Structures are given as structure tokens and as C-alpha cells.
Image (tube, helix red, strand yellow):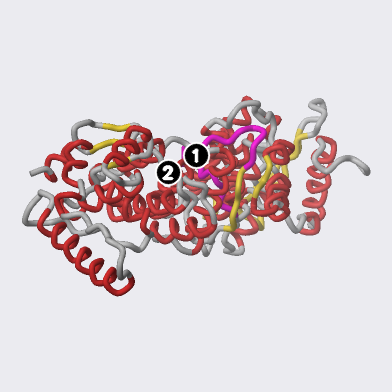
């Protein structure tokens, strides 16, 4: 049957006939191929497989993984589940690995009860069949314990491929392609051409930014809306199989747009796809920071330091920041806030306040956003204003200490400072001025601060124009009055009296403690 395809019915029939003739002539061994596909037998009773297995038993040789399955199939003692037939290569890959791990020496066959009988059935039913008995070679049997081991292992292998098999039952066009292959264990994919293509994309993408338009060419039925959770996880797993962590992480809430991009970074072999606890808790921290700030290099470094990350975790967080900076940060939910460790919350809020102040962007809107962040972080609102005040003076400056003895403004201390200033002024006048009459510096009661405080505290807020006019009436610039009142508040209470730019809000609790 020269020219017949190896797997065709004609080739199988011819092989069986030639082997039958060789048995009669005593030359059967010459027709046994070096490698025999014993797991998908040509027929229920395959003469070549029966002969090979009986020879193994006679020579006391252990069975390979494939032969262990064939031994049961030929006897009719094994009924594999659907994945064995639908995705046979993948199931056998898993089975061979399990067999090698658990039965390193291999399973053995037991002698059968009598000589080996091999039957040849002609293709033409009119010809009938012929039986060959080999008196020098006994048949074999599988011990019940060995049979159970084979069935259990094959069951595990089929279970590992069950999701992939079910997917192919309704989407056969996805065989060996995305998204179906993400349902397979990594060990069965080997040099899958789709995964190799993703690997190439990752290596050739500047900054690890892989456009979705390039990914769609390797995905059957690329969606026209943001990826579902299942599709998101499938894509992340596909990159993971090739040694890359993808952002947004499959456990995150940031959506992937069909015409957007993802960011990938090389991963360490020993880490898990979900990442460490520290990495996962850093994601809402990054989302919050990106929502409030333009994250540049130094800020990234500070954020990574606050989160206590290093190595691969730091690289993954950087990739996440790249993604949310380009496509927008997802809303930080209450559950996300709760994943941030308590020890990181105040340092995070400090970082945000300092960076916002350093960029001169702390207006009413930004202050309100920072207050909402503090609420999510479960940090009291009264701790936010000192942060903003300190940050306005510089990141390293410390907040003024509160007066522990009294909540009122220490007017005696103010008077002493003013008196000292007056004396110094008189000395300088005598040195540099001879004849001109010089007005005396204002007396303590004339500096107007207590009266200004009372008037400012009479309302909950002032517009910028109103506050400037009020300060002018007391002989002060608006900015100077603002700073003086807040410095006095820090001296007396430890918190600012005023907040915001337009309107300027007055903290009634601070005002109450400052007033006599």
C-alpha cells in the first residue's frame, strides 16, 4: 500500500496484515517501530501493541507512561473522559509528567493465563478473520492496584484540561489559539506559535507598552469593548507563560480597552502571577497618587519606597503607574483602601500633601481631594491641615508644637516680642537718624491681631477679596495676615485656623480655642 498516508485506514490495515504474516514467519520483531503511539490505538485490539506489551511483561521491563494507558485500553478496562479525545496531546503531556513524578521506576505487568492470542480481521468481512497463537509468549494482565493508579492519574490529567476541552466544544476554531490556550496548564503549551508571537511583541515594544492592535492579530474574536474579566485574565496568563507580568494585573480593576495597550515587565521565575501582598497593596496607593498628581520619576521612587517594594514588585508597580497614567486610574474603592497596610497610610498622605504643595497646586479643589483621600485612609481630618502647612514650608519641615498649657493665644508672649522689636528699632534710629522725628513702633495692643482674629472668627468663610479688604483695614497684606493667624493658631492649638484660597475657610473649633 505504497503512498498511503500513515494514519489512513488503508495504511493501518496493511500494517496489521504485514505484522500477521511476520508472526507466522517468526520475524515480528522487525516490524515493531521504535516509537509506537500506544495511547490512540488503531483498533480496540491492536496486534502490534499486544505483542509489544507481552514482550515487556516477559522481559520484566517497566512500562512507559504511554504503554501504561495502552495496557488498559486494549483490555477494555479504561474509558477516558472527553478531554482525552478532544485535546489528546495536551492531556498526555500532563499524564506523562504525573507518571514520571509518581512512578519513577514505572509500573509492571503481570503474566496472563495462557499463551498470547493475536487475531487478524480482514477489511472484507467476507474473508473473515485469522488467529495466531504464540506458545512461547504469554499474554499479560494488569494488577488491580496498577490499573487504579493509571486511572487516577489520567483522571487528574483530564481534569487539568477540562476547561480547555469545554471551551473547544463550542469554539473549535480557538484550538491552539487565544483566548482558549490560556485555559491550558503552561506545561502543555511548549513552543505555541501564539505565545511566541506575544513574546516577540513584548521584546520589541518600547517601555514594555504592547498595543492591543498588535495583540488582536493573535486573538480569535478580539472584542470591540473593554476586555471581560475572563479575557483580561487570559491575556495576563498568556504573557505570564512567556515570562512577563502584565499591567493592569488580572486581579485589578483597571479595564483594558480594545484599542488601548497593556504594559509588561519581565518577572522572576519563583513569583506568583498575583504578585506579593506588598505589591497588591501598592496598587490602590498608585491609583490614588495618579488621581491626584502627575507622577514623575522622583515621585515614583518615593511611592515605591513608601510601599516598601523592591525588585520585581517595584518593576510591576512602575508598569502599573505607566498604564494608569496613560489610560486613567480606577476609582479607589473602600475595599481597595482597606488593603493598604496601616503603617503605609500616613506616609502616603504625607507624600501626596508634600508633592501637591511643592507644585503649588493646593487650592480648595485639591484640598478637598486630599481630605477625601484621608477619609478613605481613615486618617482624621485634623491631621491633614498640618501636613499642608508643613508641606508649604518644605517637605522636611516639622509642624509647630501645640501649646499644652493653654488653648488661648499667648498675648504676653506677643507683647514681649513686639517690645523687643521696639527697643531694637529705637537703637537703630539713634544710630542712623539724627534729626528726623521717628514714629514709635506700635504697642502690643496696637498690632491688631486679637481684633483681627475676633473678626475673622465671626464667619465660617471669607472670599479672597473680602479677606484682603479686612487685612487692609488692620494695616496688613492679605498673605501676611493669613500666615500670622495660622502661625498663632499653630502656637496655641497645633492646627491651622485658615484653609483654602477662595473662599478662605475658618476652622471654628480652632478659633474657639484661640479666643479668650
* Mark 1 closeness class: few <14, some 14–19, many ≥20 residues within 10 Å: many
* Mark 2 closeness class: few <14, some 14–19, many ≥20 residues within 10 Å: many
Q: Quadrant of the N terminus?
A: top right
Question: Contact, CB < 8 Å: mark 1 with mark 2?
Answer: yes
Task: Residue 30 in the image: state x and y as whole percent.
Answer: 80, 58
Tell me what residue is drawn at x 61 percent, y 64 percent. 59
Instruction: State whether residue 50 appears in this view.
Output: yes
Nearer the observer, 124 or 345: 345
Q: Start and end of the magenta stretch?
A: 244-261
In terms of image quadrants, where is residue 181? top right
Nearer the observer, 474 or 173: 474
Dot 2 falls on a residue whose secondary structure is helix
Task: Residue 289 in the image: state x and y as whole percent.
Answer: 44, 46
Q: In the rendered view, does 101 fall on the left or right side of 280?
A: right
Nearer the observer, 172 or 219: 219
Residue highlighted by disc 1: 329
Task: Residue 178 in the image: state x and y as whole percent.
Answer: 66, 38
Dot 1 falls on a residue whose secondary structure is loop
Nearer the observer, 7 or 315: 315
Amino acid at each position: 500500500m505504497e503512498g498511503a498516508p500513515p494514519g489512513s485506514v488503508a495504511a493501518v490495515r496493511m500494517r496489521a496484515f504485514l505484522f500477521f504474516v511476520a508472526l507466522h514467519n517468526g520475524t515480528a520483531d522487525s516490524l515493531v517501530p521504535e516509537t509506537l503511539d500506544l495511547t490512540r490505538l488503531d483498533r480496540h485490539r491492536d496486534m502490534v501493541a499486544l505483542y509489544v506489551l507481552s514482550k515487556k511483561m516477559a522481559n520484566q521491563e517497566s512500562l512507559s507512561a504511554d504503554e501504561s494507558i495502552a495496557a488498559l485500553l486494549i483490555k477494555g478496562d479504561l474509558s477516558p473522559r472527553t478531554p482525552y479525545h478532544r485535546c489528546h496531546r495536551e492531556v498526555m503531556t500532563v499524564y506523562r509528567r504525573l507518571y514520571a513524578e509518581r512512578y519513577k521506576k514505572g509500573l509492571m505487568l503481570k503474566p496472563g493465563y495462557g499463551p498470547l492470542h493475536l487475531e487478524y480481521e480482514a477489511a472484507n468481512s467476507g474473508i473473515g478473520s485469522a488467529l495466531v497463537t504464540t506458545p512461547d509468549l504469554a499474554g499479560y494482565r494488569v494488577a488491580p492496584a496498577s490499573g487504579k493508579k493509571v486511572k487516577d492519574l489520567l483522571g487528574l490529567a483530564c481534569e487539568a484540561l477540562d476547561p480547555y476541552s469545554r471551551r473547544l466544544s463550542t469554539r473549535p476554531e480557538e484550538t491552539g489559539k487565544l483566548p482558549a490556550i490560556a485555559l491550558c496548564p503552561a506545561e502543555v503549551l511548549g513552543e505555541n506559535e501564539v505565545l511566541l508571537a506575544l513574546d516577540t511583541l513584548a521584546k520589541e515594544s518600547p517601555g514594555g507598552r504592547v498595543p492591543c492592535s498588535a495583540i488582536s492579530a493573535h486573538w480569535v474574536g478580539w472584542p470591540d469593548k473593554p476586555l471581560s474579566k475572563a479575557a483580561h485574565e487570559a491575556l495576563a496568563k498568556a504573557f505570564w507563560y512567556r515570562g512577563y507580568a502584565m499591567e493592569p494585573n488580572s486581579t485589578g480593576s483597571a479595564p483594558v480597552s480594545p484599542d488601548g495597550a497593556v504594559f509588561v515587565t519581565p518577572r522572576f521565575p519563583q513569583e506568583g502571577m498575583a504578585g506579593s501582598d506588598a505589591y497588591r497593596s501598592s496598587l490602590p496607593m498608585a491609583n490614588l497618587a495618579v488621581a491626584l498628581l502627575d507622577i514623575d520619576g522622583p515621585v515614583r521612587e518615593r511611592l515605591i519606597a513608601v510601599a516598601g517594594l523592591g525588585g520585581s514588585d517595584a518593576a510591576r508597580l512602575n508598569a502599573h503607574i505607566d498604564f494608569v497614567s496613560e489610560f486613567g486610574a480606577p476609582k479607589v474603592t473602600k475595599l481597595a483602601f482597606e488593603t493598604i497596610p496601616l503603617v503605609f497610610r500616613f506616609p502616603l498622605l504625607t507624600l501626596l500633601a508634600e508633592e501637591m504643595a511643592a507644585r503649588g497646586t493646593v487650592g480648595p479643589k485639591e484640598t478637598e481631594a486630599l481630605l477625601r483621600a484621608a477619609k478613605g485612609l481613615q486618617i482624621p481630618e485634623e491631621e491633614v491641615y498640618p501636613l499642608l502647612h508643613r508641606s508649604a514650608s518644605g517637605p522636611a519641615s516639622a509642624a509647630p508644637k501645640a501649646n499644652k498649657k493653654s488653648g488661648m493665644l499667648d498675648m504676653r508672649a506677643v507683647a514681649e516680642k513686639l517690645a523687643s522689636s521696639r527697643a531694637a528699632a529705637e537703637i537703630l534710629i539713634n544710630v542712623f537718624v539724627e534729626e528726623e522725628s521717628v514714629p514709635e513702633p506700635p504697642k502690643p495692643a496696637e498690632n491688631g491681631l486679637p481684633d483681627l482674629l475676633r473678626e475673622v472668627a465671626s464667619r465660617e468663610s471669607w472670599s479672597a477679596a473680602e479677606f484682603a479688604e479686612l487685612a487692609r483695614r488692620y494695616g496688613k497684606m492679605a498673605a501676611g495676615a493669613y500666615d500670622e493667624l495660622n502661625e498663632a493658631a499653630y502656637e496655641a492649638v497645633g492646627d491651622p485656623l485658615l484653609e483654602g484660597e477662595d473662599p478662605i475657610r475658618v476652622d471654628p473649633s480652632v478659633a474657639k480655642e484661640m479666643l479668650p
